[in-house]
Amino acid sequence: MTTVDPDELLTKAKAPVLVTQSSMPPMEEYFAEIASLWDSKWLTNRGEKVRSLEAALGEYLSVKNGTLFANGHLALETLLAAMDLEGEVITTPFTFASTTHAIVRNGLTPVFADIKADDYTLDPAAVEAAITPRTSAILAVHVYGGLCDVDALQTIADRHGLAVIYDAAHAFGVERDGIGAGTFGDASMFSFHATKVFNTIEGGLATVKDPQVVERLHKLQNFGISGPERVTDVAGNGKMNEFAAAMGLCNLRYIDGEIKRRSVVDAQYRANLADVPGITFLAKQRGVTQNHAYLPVRITEDEFGVSRDRIYEDLKQNGVTARKYFFPLVSDFEAYAGKFDSSDTPVARRAANEVLALPMFSDLAAEDVDRITTELLNLHFEGRV
Ligand code: T4K
C-alpha cells in the first residue's frame, strides 16, 4: 500500500483551477511538424502548412472555401468587409466583444435583437422585428457551441434579402444531422484561439458559400494586394503564419479524443448537479452534436439560494476561476456608452446576470470537478438556511 503525504494532498487540493487550459500536442510531434520550416525558410504568406491545414479543416468541418486567418476576430472583420454590407446588421448582445466590434469597425451599425432563454442564441422573432429598410445582414452567434435556429433565420433572411453570417467561434466540429456548422448561412467564422476546443495558438477560419468571395478574402487579408504591382483595396494584414498552422495540424490529430474527454467532464458536472434547484445546464439540441467548448450553467437565485455573483466570488476564494461569459452585455460596454439600451433585450440581460461558465477542459481532473460541484452544493444548502 502506498503512503500518502498529507502535505502533497493539501497542495493538490488547493491547486488553482482556471476556466480553461489550452490543449497541446506532444512537444516532439510539434517539433517534427515545424522542422521543415528550417529548410524552406517560408514562414508566412499562405505557406505550405497553412494550405495543408485549410485542406484538412475543409474535410474535418465539411466546409468548402475555408481561409485561415491570424485570429478569429480578423477572420470575422474581413468576412464582413468582403461581403460589401451596408447600413445595419442585426446581432446579439450576448457575446464576446469581437462580434460587435467587427460590425462597428466595418462602419456598419449593430442593431441588437434579443436571445432565446433556452440556448442563448438569437430569437428569430426578435430578429424579424428589428429589420428596417437599412438592414443588410444578420450576424448570429452559435454561443457555447449550441447552434442558432439556422432554418428560421435563413427563412427570414430570404424573405427580406439579407445576408446571414455566423460567428461560429465556439462551434468547432458541431454538426446538425451530419451537416457542419460552417455550411449554414452565407459565411461563418471559427476561432482557433488558445482557449478553444481546437487551437492554432491564435487563429481563425472564414468559410463562405460563394467561392468568389474567397479570392476577395485572400486579398483583404494581405493589404488589398491584387498582384505584384497592383493594390486594389485598402486592407490590413490578417494572415496566419506557418508555426500556428503547424500547431493546428498537430492538434487536429487529437481533436476527437479532445472532445470525447470534454464530454466525460461535462457528464460528471451534469451528474453531480442533477436535480439541484436553480441550476440549469445548456439544453441539448435535437440532432446537434456537442463539442463541449464551455460549461455554462444558469443560476436562478430564487431557487438556488445564492446569486451567480456570490458563487463566482466563493469559487475564486477557493482557487477556482469560473468566468461570467458574457457579462456585461456588449450593449452595456463603456465603449458603446449612450448608444444602446440593454433593457431592450431583457432575456439577454437576465442571462448576462445569471450564467456562469465553470471550468471546462479535457485535462480537468475528476476530483477537481467534484471539488467545484461540492462547493456549489455547499452554497446551495447554505443559501437555503
Ligand atoms: N466571437 C466569439 C463569440 C468569441 O468568443 C471570440 C473569442 C471571438 C469571436 C474572437 O475570436 P479570437 O479573435 O479570440 O480568435 C478569451 C479568448 O481570448 C477569446 O478568444 C474568447 N472568444 C473569449 C470567450 O475568451 P479571455 O479574456 O476570457 O481570455 P483569458 O486570457 O482570460 O483566458 C481564459 C483562460 O484560458 C485563462 O484563465 C487560462 C486559459 N488560457 C489562456 C491563454 C491566453 C490558457 O490555458 N492558455 C492561454 O494561452 O478571452
Image (tube, rainbow, N blue to C red):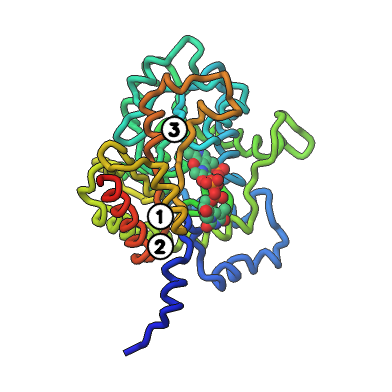
What whole-number distance in Å separates the C-alpha atoms at marks 2 and 3? 26 Å
Name the kind of residue labelled 3 in the image.
Answer: Phe
Within-10-Å neighbours for mark 3: few <14, some 14–19, many 20+:
many
Q: Using the image as rendered, state which of residue 278 and residue 28 is in the foreground.
A: 278
Q: Which residue, as the protein is rendered here, is positioned at the far front? A: 385
Location of residue 264 with respect to 99 vertically, above or below: below
Tag 2–tag 1 contact (CB < 8 Å): yes
Residue at 36% x, 40% y is 307
What whole-number distance in Å separates the C-alpha atoms at marks 2 and 1? 7 Å
Residue at which label 3 appears: 94
Q: Which residue, as the protein is rendered here, is positioned at the far left? A: 275
Residue at which label 1 appears: 360
Residue at which label 2 appears: 364
Residue at 60% x, 34% y is 78
Residue 316 % position (x, y)? 46, 53
Residue at 73% x, 37% y is 227
Tag 3–tag 1 contact (CB < 8 Å): no
In primary-sequence order, the first of circles 2 and 3 is: 3
Name the kind of residue labelled 1 in the image.
Answer: Met
Name the kind of residue labelled 2 in the image.
Answer: Leu
SS state under label 2? loop
